[in-house]
């Protein structure tokens, strides 16, 4: 009977403590290898620090929690260790030998006189070093004779939250907002601390906590008190709070007759408001602004420039350490124009006119977070302006919460692209980290994919995109494979065979997704409004560049947007070396072919297939590759936590169904132009185009 009770208890325990994903990659579960635990334990007997700042204490507490979980032992924390050995020393030093090669936020980890010393010039650097040490233990690396020196390549590493005051999240696919505005400032949700820990562990040091389509309400005393409460939670983790602001706020809040950035009363209003914010949040990070974009107000409403608006806010921020981030996502409704060019054309005349406190935040590509885009032509063309990167972590056009799509390769593809701005090697990464033009301020921002779902990101694998963004913002030289390996070991599996299979799935996932949605450089064919599922036939919308036909330009001759001088001369916005890469359809990478060329359906490509046959091959192969991912995942069942396994399994089934939806929608639509059968051995879809179109109508009814 007693034995039965033990078995029942173990059964209940295992099922009660199934992995719900809430701990993200900060899983401090007991290491199974006893010898490995003993080795680690001998090097982590105690923790001491020489400066008791809140952030250093956070680092010590995190190490203590990590060691107790991973190694199963109690570890004491003390102010000074004295002559003891076998412990961890957290050291702040302005000019000691261990910090000579460090910049702000950087850290060094060394084995020294029988201890492991984490050194930094700042408390935040110590915190990042503590998480690096824990990552080494979680991933099974040796701690003997450590010599690690790590500096962040980007100064401001930020999450942009598109969260609204009513609890919704624009382009959020993991539940409602994590910010409980109705409860703040009186109740602090414990998830705020978990969120701060997760961000600090990957080096994220800034968060803009409200939607760029901003409500002026966030600048009222009522909300500043709430934002202060959030800032107080994030501060011990080295994270500064930014606020997205509405440019019309002087009118809507201040009662002024105008929001003209050159009006003295408007400038005074922003100066006073900025001082007021700092009374609540002394280390306020700054403003994030979306202006004169998609209906949002801005300086152009008053005949002023983006620089006029940004510099007005920079003036208000001048007495403080914060900055102004001004988004470059702007475009006009011009059916005869090319949205590809518009941000460049609006901002290019302003290069050199922005205040040094301003960073112009540019999306990775010229349209809008498509699964694959050429790098934005603004990168490498604005030597006198601080340019920051804006990636989208939330998967607006990448399967949202139902498709497994690992985004590190997409981030890397952009960062590693060569702009040739100052000759070969002038990569986008060097532009946005400031090194190419010796800019002091640098920024990499990612639109967050967090929400109220228990595992934060809905799809378990979407956590990897948050993780990858942070790691690349810290060090863009890391490889996608390395980042995937870390995340897998910290979240899903310790078994090497399982890790290898999962990493392969992740690395193949983005090319697979592109194959069945946007092959060969097609773009912007998603469902209207919700941006979910295919709608390549969309021809009418609120503006022409919100339609699909505006982008794919399908006709009886061929497919693609001619940007080499036919419909548009957008290719000329790039340096000659880049133009050479993409300008000749015979030599252009197939990944970007239809971005720049209108290609005949019968044109034979480098694969030996015609354009039409190649499109069909990719659409059909994409579906088959999703099925192979399902088979691979099924083989991992014994190695994966049951709850996580079933969650991913179900989402892969959805992905297969929707890959088929994309395939059928696109081939059935484009065949109306090609008038050519689907090539063997592929079978014609069993449903008609009209039947597929009804699926979109059903989705609109949801």
Image: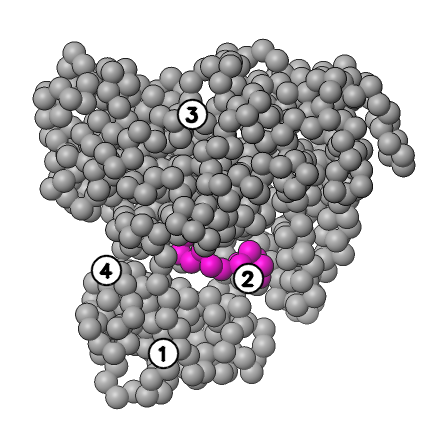
Q: Quadrant of residue 674?
A: top right
Q: Any mark on residue 110, and which?
A: 1
* In this picture, residue 154 sits left or right of residue 20: left
Q: Any mark on residue 342, and which?
A: 3
Q: Any mark on residue 482, and which?
A: 2
Q: Any mark on residue 509, and which?
A: none
On the image, the x and y values in percent for residue 535 come to 65, 21
Q: CA distance from mark 2 to mark 4?
A: 32 Å
Q: CA distance from mark 2 to mark 3?
A: 37 Å
Q: Quadrant of residue 50?
A: bottom left
> Who's the residue at 51% across and 26% down the image?
569
Contact between marks 2 and 3 (CB within 8 A): the answer is no
Crowd class of label 1 (few under 14; some 14 to 19; many from 20; radius 10 Å): some
- Judged by depth in the image, the label closer to the viewer, 2 or 3, is 3
Contact between marks 4 and 1 (CB within 8 A): the answer is no
Crowd class of label 3 (few under 14; some 14 to 19; many from 20; radius 10 Å): many
SS state under label 1? strand
- Is residue 698 at least partly visible in the picture? no
Q: CA distance from mark 3 to mark 1?
A: 50 Å
Query: Over which residues does the magenta segment extend?
Result: 470-485
> Who's the residue at 42% across and 22% down the image?
331
Quarter of the picture holding the N terminus: bottom right
SS state under label 2? helix
Which residue was labeled with disc 4? 54
Residue 242 covered by magenta stretch? no
Contact between marks 3 and 1 (CB within 8 A): the answer is no
Which secondary structure dominates the residues rendered in magenta? helix
């Amino acid at each position: 009977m007693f034995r039965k009770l033990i078995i029942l208890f173990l059964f209940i325990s295992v099922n009660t403590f199934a992995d719900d994903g809430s701990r993200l990659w900060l899983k401090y579960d007991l290491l199974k290898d006893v010898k490995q635990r003993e080795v680690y334990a001998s090097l982590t007997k105690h923790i001491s620090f020489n400066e008791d700042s809140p952030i250093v204490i956070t680092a010590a507490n995190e190490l203590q929690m990590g060691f107790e979980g991973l190694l199963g032992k109690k570890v004491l924390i003390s102010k000074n260790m004295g002559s003891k050995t076998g412990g961890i020393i957290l050291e702040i030093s302005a000019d000691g030998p261990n910090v000579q090669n460090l910049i702000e936020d950087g850290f060094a980890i060394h084995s020294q006189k029988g201890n492991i010393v984490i050194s930094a010039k700042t408390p935040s650097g110590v915190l990042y070093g503590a998480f690096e040490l824990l990552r080494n233990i979680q991933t099974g690396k040796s701690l003997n004779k450590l010599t690690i020196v790590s500096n962040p390549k980007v100064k401001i590493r930020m999450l942009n939250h598109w969260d609204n005051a009513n609890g919704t999240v624009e382009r959020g696919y993991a539940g409602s907002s994590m910010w409980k505005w109705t409860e703040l400032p009186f109740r602090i949700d414990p998830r705020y601390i978990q969120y701060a820990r997760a961000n600090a562990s990957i080096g994220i040091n800034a968060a803009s906590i409200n939607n760029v389509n901003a409500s002026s309400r966030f600048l009222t005393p009522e909300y500043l008190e709430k934002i202060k409460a959030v800032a107080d939670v994030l501060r011990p983790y080295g994270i500064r709070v930014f606020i997205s602001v509405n440019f019309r706020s002087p009118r809507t809040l201040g009662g002024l007759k105008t929001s003209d950035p050159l009006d003295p009363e408007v400038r005074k209003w922003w100066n006073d408001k900025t001082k007021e914010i700092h009374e609540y949040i002394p280390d306020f990070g700054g403003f994030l602004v979306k202006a004169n974009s998609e209906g949002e107000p801005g300086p152009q409403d008053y005949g002023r420039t983006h620089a006029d608006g940004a510099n007005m806010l920079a003036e208000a921020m001048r007495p403080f350490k914060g900055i102004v981030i001004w988004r470059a996502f702007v475009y006009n409704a011009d059916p005869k124009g090319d949205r590809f060019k518009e941000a460049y054309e609006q901002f290019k005349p302003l290069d050199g006119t922005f205040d040094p406190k301003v960073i112009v935040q540019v999306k990775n590509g010229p349209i809008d977070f498509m699964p694959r885009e050429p790098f934005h032509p603004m990168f490498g063309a604005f030597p006198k302006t601080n340019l920051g990167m804006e990636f989208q972590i939330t998967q607006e056009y990448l399967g949202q919460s139902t498709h497994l799509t690992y985004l590190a390769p997409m981030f890397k593809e952009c960062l590693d692209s060569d702009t040739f701005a100052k000759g070969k090697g002038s990569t986008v990464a060097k532009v946005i980290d400031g090194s190419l033009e010796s800019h002091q301020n640098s920024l990499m921002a990612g639109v967050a994919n967090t929400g109220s779902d228990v595992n934060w990101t809905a799809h378990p694998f979407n956590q990897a995109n948050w993780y990858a963004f942070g790691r690349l913002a810290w060090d863009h030289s890391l490889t996608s494979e390395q980042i995937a390996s870390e995340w897998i070991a910290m979240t899903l599996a310790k078994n090497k065979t399982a890790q290898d299979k999962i990493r392969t799935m992740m690395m193949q996932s983005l090319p697979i997704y592109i194959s069945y949605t946007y092959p060969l450089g097609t773009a912007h064919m998603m469902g209207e409004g919700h941006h979910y599922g295919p709608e390549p036939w969309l021809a009418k919308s609120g503006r022409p560049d919100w339609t699909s036909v505006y982008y794919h330009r399908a006709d009886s001759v061929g497919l693609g947007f001619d940007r080499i001088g036919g419909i548009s001369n957008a290719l000329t916005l790039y340096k000659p070396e880049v133009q050479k890469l993409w300008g000749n359809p015979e030599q252009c990478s197939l990944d970007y072919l239809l971005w720049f060329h209108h290609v005949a359906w019968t044109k034979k490509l480098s694969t030996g297939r015609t354009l039409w046959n190649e499109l069909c091959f990719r659409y059909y192969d994409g579906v088959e590759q999703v099925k192979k991912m399902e088979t691979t995942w099924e083989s991992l069942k014994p190695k994966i936590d049951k709850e996580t396994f079933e969650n991913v399994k179900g989402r892969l089934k959805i992905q297969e169904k929707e890959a088929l939806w994309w395939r059928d929608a696109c081939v059935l639509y484009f065949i109306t132009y090609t008038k050519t059968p689907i090539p063997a051995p592929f079978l014609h879809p069993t449903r008609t185009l009209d039947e597929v179109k009804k699926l979109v109508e059903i989705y609109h009814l949801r």
